[in-house]
Amino acid sequence: MSTPVTVLGLGPMGRGMARALLAAGHPTTVWNRTPGRADELVTAGAVPAGSPGAAVAASPLTILSLTDYQAMYDILGDVDLAGRVLVNLSSDTPERTREAATWAAGRGARFVAGGVMVPAPLLGTDAAYVYYSGDEAAFDEYAGVLARIGRPHRLGPDPALAQLYYQANLDMFLTALAGYLHATALVGSAGVSAAEFAPWAADLFDSLSAYLPAAAGHIDSGEHPGTLSTVRMMGATADHVVGASDAAGLHTGLPAAVRDLYDRAVAAGHATDNWTSLIDVIRTP
């Protein structure tokens, strides 16, 4: 028989996880503060629990998909967790994740933190992947179950690592999407539609990965040869983006923040270094 699993929190992500587990044949118990969110899952075969305690008691493995880690304390504060495995796939800071692991251990539970790197519709597909860290024995025991949600990537025993990777990915994701919107608004100031600009934006996004291997080498070695794409040259371009945005009547906060990094790098003596030297001023705010 497949391992029984409990899912707490039935927002879009939680429902997607429960659907993937049900599709893989796992007996799945669900609970949510708003009971109606469980209806479609119950129709698909999930068992609704009347309380968080009943939900946790129903399975050796409980997966949490909540707003943040405080929600875990609110929901499970009075629940007997002894002998249970908690896999928290909610978002929060790395430090709060470490605190949560300590809290769970004090309640007799084994704790694994995770970060889901795809939107809800992709859960359970080949495109889905999830970072995990924390109790490695617990992860190993249930890795096959967790793989039903997405490809599991174990990062080590520090429970904060999964959140750190998750937030680092979102750092890139959110900044890139904001950059796309700002760029679309910039060309839009000349009457260019978003649809017309989209293929060019896609070409740029597709090309960015080609920069990463060399950039990682510069960062890890601490050497930033300025043969191409120097800080001074890139900084001048960043200044032009701010000027163009200002002239178009756009909010300049995002490009101004980028320009500030280049200005600070020049002031720190990196004018003739590669753009990767910006990491030094990022590391020393």
Image: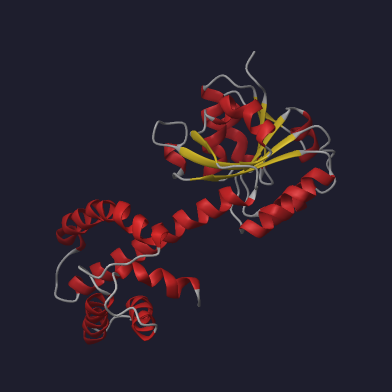
How many marks are shown on the rendered structure?
A: 0
Q: Is residue 230 above or below residue 25?
A: below
Q: Position of residue 126 (x, y in %)?
A: 40, 31
Residue at screen point 85% across, 46% down: 78
Is there any visible trace of residue 14 in the rendered image?
yes
Residue at screen point 29% across, 55% down: 214
Q: Is residue 122 above or below residue 182?
A: above
Q: Position of residue 119 (x, y in %)?
A: 44, 45
Colour scheme shown? secondary structure
Q: Which residue is most to the top? A: 1
Locate the N terminus by quadrant. Answer: top right
Q: Residue 52 versus residue 213: which sits nearer the camera?
A: 213
Q: Is residue 43 above or below residue 205?
A: above
Q: Residue 139 versus residue 40: which sits nearer the camera?
A: 139
- Using the rendered view, name the quadrant where residue 230 is placed: bottom left
Q: Position of residue 143 (x, y in %)?
A: 59, 28
Residue at screen point 26% across, 55% down: 205
Is there any visible trace of residue 30 in the rendered image?
no
Q: Residue 234 versus residue 280: which sits nearer the camera?
A: 280
Residue at screen point 74% across, 34% down: 55
Left or right: where does residue 151 sit relative to residue 66? left
- Using the rendered view, name the quadrant where residue 200 is placed: bottom left
Left or right: where does residue 262 sit relative to residue 153? left
Q: Position of residue 82 (x, y in %)?
A: 84, 35
- Using the rendered view, name the quadrant where residue 271 is placed: bottom left
